[in-house]
């Protein structure tokens, strides 16, 4: 029994010899450590226009989407039924990357006169979505397909 007590005291002594850091040091280490988790997406509220709700589609894979994000969905607000889905922009997929940049919309605004949505991607690309034609056109900023033109 005395041997077990001596071993216990020895283990406690060894554990106490380790380097300890104070709370300020711990806070500094925590804030500097790179995280692999993705920040929360920006809140982009749905837009209602001519009896239809338009919102970014966070479930596109369940409905035939081919990439993680970059989709707009039109929904009947009375029934919740999905009317149609459109890929607004390409999302670059990088194998092994902790998250994919450009996956979420940063903002979405309606131009009611033209019947268009202006969608800004997480990467800063701007796109016009024609709601009648159900088409998307890149207008400016970075994205995975269009590159800014170099001025000579």
Image (cartoon, rainbow, N blue to C red):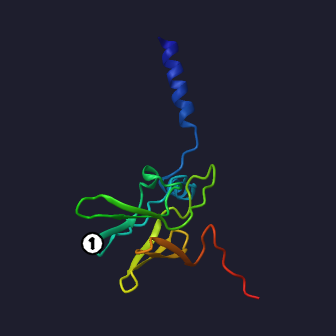
Q: Where on the picture, by quarter, is residue 99?
A: bottom right
Residue that protrudes farthest toward the front in the picture: 133
Residue 125 x %, y %: 55, 74
Helix, strand or loop at label 1? It is: loop
Q: Residue at x 47, y 11 (%)?
A: 1
Horizontal side, residue 78 vs residue 21: left or right: left
Tell me how many marks there are: 1
Q: Nearer the viewer, residue 135 or 38?
A: 135
Q: In which quarter of the view is residue 73 placed?
A: bottom left
Q: Residues within 10 Å of mark 1 (few under 14, many from 20)?
A: few
Between 51 and 41, the one lying in front of the other is 51
Front residue (pair 12, 79): 79
Q: Residue furthest top?
A: 1
- Expressed as whole percent of the image width and height from the top left, the position of residue 42 reads 42, 66
Q: Quadrant of the C terminus?
A: bottom right
Give the residue at x 26% y 64%: 77
Above or below 74: residue 12: above
Q: Residue at x 53, y 56 (%)?
A: 67
* Residue at the disc numbered 1: 51
> Residue shown at 57%/37% (left/top)?
17
- The residue sitting at the left extreme is 78
Q: Residue furthest right?
A: 152
147 is higher (above) or lower (below) than 78 = below
- Comparing 13 with 100, the one in front is 100
Above or below, 33 against 126 in this view is: above
């Amino acid at each position: 029994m005395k041997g077990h007590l001596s071993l216990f005291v020895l283990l406690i002594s060894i554990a106490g010899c380790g380097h300890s850091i104070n709370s300020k040091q711990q806070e500094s280490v925590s804030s500097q450590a790179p995280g692999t988790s993705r920040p929360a997406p920006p809140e982009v509220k749905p837009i209602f226009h001519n009896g239809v709700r338009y919102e970014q589609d966070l479930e596109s894979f369940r409905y035939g989407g081919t990439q993680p994000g970059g989709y707009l969905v039109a929904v009947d607000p009375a029934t919740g039924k999905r009317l149609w889905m459109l890929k607004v922009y390409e999302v670059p997929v990088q194998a092994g990357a902790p998250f994919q940049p450009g996956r979420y919309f940063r903002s979405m605004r309606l131009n009611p006169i033209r019947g268009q949505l202006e969608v800004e991607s997480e990467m800063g690309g701007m796109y016009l979505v024609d709601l009648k034609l159900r088409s998307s056109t890149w207008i400016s900023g970075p994205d995975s397909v269009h590159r800014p033109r170099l001025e000579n």
